[in-house]
Amino acid sequence: MSADRLSVRHDDGEPLLQVAELRTHFRTPRGMVRAVDGVTFTLERGKALGVVGESGSGKTVLARTVMGLLPKRNVNTSGSVRFGGVEMLGLPQRQMRELWGTEMAMVFQDPMSSLNPLMKVGKQITEPLRFHMGMGKSDSIATAERLLRDVRIPEPRRRLNQYPHELSGGMRQRVMIAIALACGPNLLFADEPTTALDVTVQSQILDLIAEQRRDRNMAVILVTHDLGVVANYTDEIAVMYAGRLVEKAPTRTLFSNMKMPYTKALLRSIPKLNLPSHTRLDTIPGRPPDLVHPPRGCRFAPRCANARDRCTEEEPPLLAADSDDHTYACWYPVGSPEYREREEQLKRLDDRRVLAAEEAG
Amino acid sequence: MTTTSMDTMTAMPDAASDERVATKRRLPKLGVTFGVLWLGTLIFLAVFADFMPFIRGYGQSLDGATNTRFGPGIDFWFGSDTLGRDVFARCIYGARTSLTIASASILVGTVVGGTLGMVAGYFKGWVDRVISIFTDSLLALPAIIIASLLVGRFDVLADSDIKFLGFGFGWMSRTWSVTIVFSLLSIAPVARIVRAQTLSLSQREYVLAARSLGASTRRVLWREIVPNVIPALTAVIFTGIAILLAAEGGLAFLGYSVPRPPSWGSMIADDRDKIEEAWWTSIFPCFMLFFTVLAFNLIGDRLARRFDIREAAL
């Protein structure tokens, strides 16, 4: 095993993760589902990247492809995933296993089902420690206790001897995080880590991940459908739509200067506290496109209020905005003259409708 | 739950309804208690029959008596048969034979079928196809006909001088051949259930989580899948034993019984024509069979229900 040990490098200036033109296609009876279709990004050490998009936009598949967790059968992947200078795509499972846990780990969406119900919490934490780090029994138990304390679980000693069903959802997600952190990974995937938890626990869990990221200089890929969630916890945000990256920018830039109408629509669909009650929430009309036959041109065009003829004919390339690290794929981005013109038309229409309603009512 | 919250709301605890709820919950346990007690006693007696002063030998006849057939009474609890053998003792020794055959077969079936089912369910693809075709064909066979056919062939084999890899088949008594046949027949149902369980378990997030932490396939199978299959499997095992016990009776009825020590099936089969003069010789083994099958079923049901609840709470 040691003969073909992977030489993952962590010293030179190379970024931790480089993903280029990544495509993941599922062969299904209906045809090829292009779940991830040409995604490119890089992630530096210790940074946090948020991947945002609706359900079915390919976020989870992207994370699982990068990690190498997808089944081989009926899955076509192409492109490149370089982790610490090593090409990961196409590595055999045996070699991937050396990286899983120690180099990269994943926290899953549903803490209710991601712990083995029949194994004590302690056992589930100590197993990877003993397996990967070669720790002895007492060593691993001590480390597990420390890990549980790190993730703010009260009475860690007692928890080690409990089964998952004795813990609450938030507690279980903490345990999941502790397990994922156990072997000191350099990259943590958090696949909607808070979706199954209630709101008060959400921020605790995200704070915890952020804190652990700082302490361990660990890179994090945070997959979520909630722009609000990523805003406070990421350095960079990548917005996905129908298997493609449609906008990518440093978090601050994205929120101050978003270019893609889809990003804007996503942001608008989040309820805001300062709006009066009973304000109708802006939704994005329609559904995400069928990934077997994605629409021609821009994939968001059929649902985009600002779409013009060109949008349905030509696919917009990823363009650089004001700075190099802000890219977007849109012919008529937010702020462009065409966009503003359409905005005004829509607003006039809306006003007229309100007026008509008032007259009628 | 609802009752308690209602009570606190109305602040008038209704003692009667509370009690009704409590007894309702206790009721199902009766069956299981009976099952456990019955099986416990039976297994204890069967194992230690040789050391029990009140259990006579199963082949032992009464010496010097002219009339050897007694009805149930103080001396012979279940009466004695035509040859003056104690029916109670034979029932106990019968338990030994019947239970050994049934549990040994289900053990083999579980190990072989469980492995096949787990491999099929976890690896899917062509492995699954091959195993599924194999188990489906086994299930398509008419079990009792195959069983009687095979036992008959094994009898011929045991009497012959045929050698396989230098070994003869003289050792193969009826006990052995029935066990072998039942083992074969119990592989397919177990494999099927384990396969289905594994299919759904392998999609669980904790299996993916274990893989994402670098667990090997063997580790995932042993630590994540097997422990989670076992609850369902125990239920299957108990029901399976019950079915095999009854099947052994059926086989005995067809003449392929285990003569010594007699199984319940063979006792019933041997004495069923004397039911007019000596009903006790065949009715008591019938009762034994009935209550034992019932006990296994009750326990199996209880286990299934219990683990279902646990499963639902996941």
Image (spheres, rainbow, N blue to C red):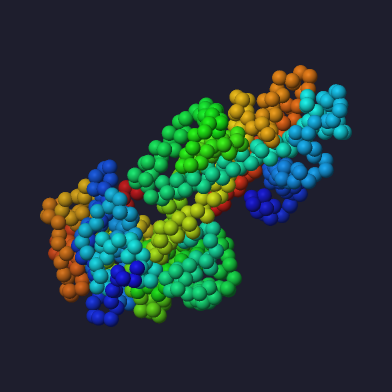
- To which quarter of the image does residue A202 belong? bottom left
Rendering coords of residue B277 (x, y %): 79, 19
Residue for point 21% across, 71% down: A326
Whether residue A258 is visible, yes or no, is no
Residue B232 or residue A239, whichever sits in front: B232
Whether residue A225 is visible, yes or no, is yes
Q: Tell me: B13 left or right of B191.
A: right
- To which quarter of the image does residue A203 belong? bottom left
Q: Quadrant of the N terminus of chain A?
A: bottom left
Residue B16 or residue B99, whichever sits in front: B99
Residue for point 33% across, 61% down: A93
Rendering coords of residue B290 (x, y %): 68, 33
Residue B196 or residue A321, whichever sits in front: B196
Residue for point 17% across, 61% down: A330
Rendering coords of residue B280 (x, y %): 77, 26
Q: Tell me: A170 left or right of B256.
A: left
Residue A244 or residue B141, whichever sits in front: B141
Rendering coords of residue B84 (x, y %): 80, 28
Q: Is residue B214 above or below residue B231?
A: below
Q: Is residue A209 above or below residue A79?
A: below
- To which quarter of the image does residue B24 belong? top right
Furthest residue to the top? B276
Q: How many marks?
A: 0
Residue for point 71% across, 19% down: B273
